[in-house]
Amino acid sequence: AMTASSAVLGALIQKTKTGLGQQIFVPLHDSMYQGMGGNLIRHSKRNEGRQVSHPAVGRVYKCKDGKWLNINMSHPRFLEPFLKSIDRFEWFKELSDVEKLLSDSEHLSIWKEKFDSIWKNKTSKEWEDKMGEIGVPGSVSRTIEEWIKEDQAFISGAIVDIEDPNFGKMKQPGKLVQNIEKEGVTCLIQTHL
C-alpha cells in the first residue's frame, strides 16, 4: 500500500489535470523493498532496524541453489497459505501459539530447524515464483548486478539505460513517477529510485 500510494497520488493529479483515467502497477522490486526496508533502517526507539517477527519463522532462508530468499511471513494471513501450499497446514496451530514458542526454547529450536529445512528442496527462483502464486511476500536476495539484468527492472522503469557524455552507455535508476504515452493515453507509473 505504501509503495502504491505515490502512484495513486500521481494518477489523481493527472486525472485532475486531464480528466483521463490511469493505469497503475507496482513492480515486485518496489513492493519487496517495503518488506526488506526495515532491515536497512535503524529506528531511534529500536535496538535494531528489523521489525518484530515470528519467533520460529525467519526472514531469510538459504535455498537449494545456495541463494537466499527474503520472506515476510510473520503474520498468519501469510503463514496460513504458505503452510497449505507445502502440505503442512497441521503446523499452523502450534506456530500460531507464539507464547508457547517463546516460553520453551527447545520447542522453538525444533520449529526453527523444521523451517530451515523446508527451503532446501527448491531453488530460490522456484520459491519466489511459488510465493507470488500464493500471495506471500517473498523475493530472491539479488545483488545489484543480478537485479539490473532482470527484465522486471527495465519493464518497471526502475532501471533505465542512458548514454552519458562522459561514461558512455550506462544503467541508472529511473524516475520516481513517469509520465508515458500508451495508445494515446497518458499514464503515470510509479517506480523507486
Image (cartoon, rainbow, N blue to C red):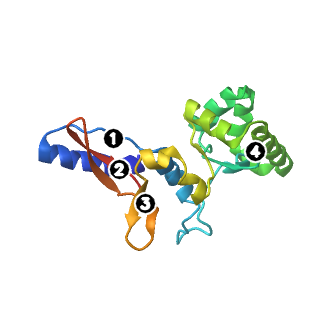
Label 2 vs 1, first from the N-terminus: 1
Element at badge 4? loop
Crowd around label 3: few <14 · some 14–19 · many ≥20 (10 Å): some
Element at badge 1? loop
**Which residue in the structure is indicated by mark 1?**
24
What residue is shown at x 35% (from left), y 57% (from top)?
176
Residue 51 in view, yes or no:
no
Dot 4 amino acid type: Asp
Dot 1 amino acid type: Ile
| Residue 145 placement, left or right of 157 | right
Dot 2 amino acid type: Gln
Disc nearest the viewer among 2 and 3: 3
Identify the disc placed on residue 190: 2
Disc nearest the viewer among 3 and 1: 3
Crowd around label 1: few <14 · some 14–19 · many ≥20 (10 Å): some
**How far is mark 4 from mark 2, CA to CA?**
32 Å
Q: Who is closer to the viewer here, 185 or 69? A: 185
| Residue 160 placement, left or right of 132 | left
Residue 185 in view, yes or no:
yes
Label 4 vs 2, first from the N-terminus: 4
* Picture layout, residue 52 above or below residue 116: below
Label 3 vs 1, first from the N-terminus: 1
Element at badge 3? strand
> Pointer 2 and pointer 1: residues touching (CB < 8 Å)?
yes
| Residue 19 placement, left or right of 40 | left
**Which residue in the structure is indicated by mark 3?**
173
Q: Who is closer to the viewer here, 93 or 125? A: 125
* Picture layout, residue 72 above or below residue 143: above
Disc nearest the viewer among 4 and 2: 4
Label 2 vs 3, first from the N-terminus: 3
Identify the disc placed on residue 65: 4
**How far is mark 2 from mark 1, CA to CA?**
7 Å
